[in-house]
Image (tube, coloured by chain):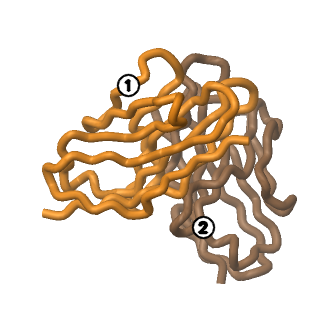
Amino acid sequence: ETGVTQSPTHLIKTRGQQVTLRCSSQSGHNTVSWYQQALGQGPQFIFQYYREEENGRGNFPPRFSGLQFPNYSSELNVNALELDDSALYLCASSSTGGPDYGYTFGSGTRLTVV
Amino acid sequence: AQSVTQPDIHITVSEGASLELRCNYSYGATPYLFWYVQSPGQGLQLLLKYFSGDTLVQGIKGFEAEFKRSQSSFNLRKPSVHWSDAAEYFCAVGASTGFQKLVFGTGTRLLVSP
C-alpha cells in the first residue's frame, strides 16, 4: 500500500508568479484535501476534492485553485504569488463513506516566495 | 464552527518522565478527534483518533488520549517519554456528519531533556 506522495519537495518562486503542486493519493482513497501550514502554525484547510469536484473550501482567495484527476491524484495551483503564500503545503487523502474516517498526509511541499 | 485550542506552545519533559499535552475543542455535536505528530520538515503522522465508544483511546508509539465530553477535552498522554518523541504535536477536530475537513490547533512543541 503506497502512501501519499507530493512533488516537488521544495520550491522557490518569485512574487507574482504561478505555481503548481502535485499530489498522488493513497491507494483506495478517493478524496484529496489540501492544507497550508505557515511557519509556527497548524495546518489550515484550503479545499477538498471528491470525484473530481471541489466539495468544500476554506477561507482562501480564488487564486488558489485545484484539480482532481480520474486516478484521484490532484494539483494545487496558486496564481499571483504573494510573500505570505510561503508555507508548507500538505496534501491528505481519505476514503469517504467508510468507518475509517481519517486522513493520510504527504510530507508536503515547502514553497518559498521571494 | 469547529475550533481547537492547545494552550501550551512549548513543553519540556525529562526523558523517562510522563507527558500530558492539552487539547480543548469546540464543536456542537460529538466530534471526531485526532492527534498528529510532525517532525521538523515532515508531514503529519496520525497518532490516534476518537470517533465513539471507549473514551480512552490507544495509539501508536505508546500514546493514549482520553475524551472528556464534560470538559471538551482530548488530552494526549504518554507514561514515559523517549528522546525520539521530541516533535510538534497537533490536535484536530473533524465534523461527525457531512463535509469532512480537519480543524487543527496551533500545536505544542515537545522538547525532551536528557
Q: Quadrant of residue A74?
A: top right
| Residue located 54% across and 69% down the image | A39
Amino acid carrying mark 2 in the image: Ala
Q: Is residue A32 among what the camera can see?
A: no
Give the structural element (helix, strand or loop) at label 1: strand
Which of pointers 2 and 1 indicates the residue nearer the eye?
Answer: 1
- Left or right of B107? Residue A29 is right
Chain corresponding to brown in the figure: A
Please name the residue that numbered disc 1 is placed on.
B56
Chain corresponding to orange in the figure: B
Q: Quadrant of residue A36?
A: bottom right
Q: Position of residue B41 (x, y in %)?
A: 43, 63
| Residue located 62% across and 35% down the image | B94
Q: Residue furthest right?
A: A62
- Left or right of A74? Residue B62 is left
- Left or right of A70? Residue B24 is left
| Residue located 59% across and 71% down the image | A11
Please name the residue that numbered disc 2 is placed on.
A87
- CA distance for labels 2 and 1: 34 Å
In the image, A63 versus A22, the foreground residue is A63
Few, some or many C-alpha atoms within 10 Å of disc 1 (few <14, some 14-19, many ≥20)? few
Amino acid carrying mark 1 in the image: Leu
| A35 vs B109: above or below | above
Q: Position of residue A13 (x, y in %)?
A: 67, 77
Quadrant location of the C terminus of chain A in the rendered image: bottom right
Quadrant location of the N terminus of chain A in the rendered image: top left
Q: Chain of mark 2?
A: A
Give the structural element (helix, strand or loop) at label 2: strand
Few, some or many C-alpha atoms within 10 Å of disc 2 (few <14, some 14-19, many ≥20)? many
Q: Residue furthest front?
A: B70
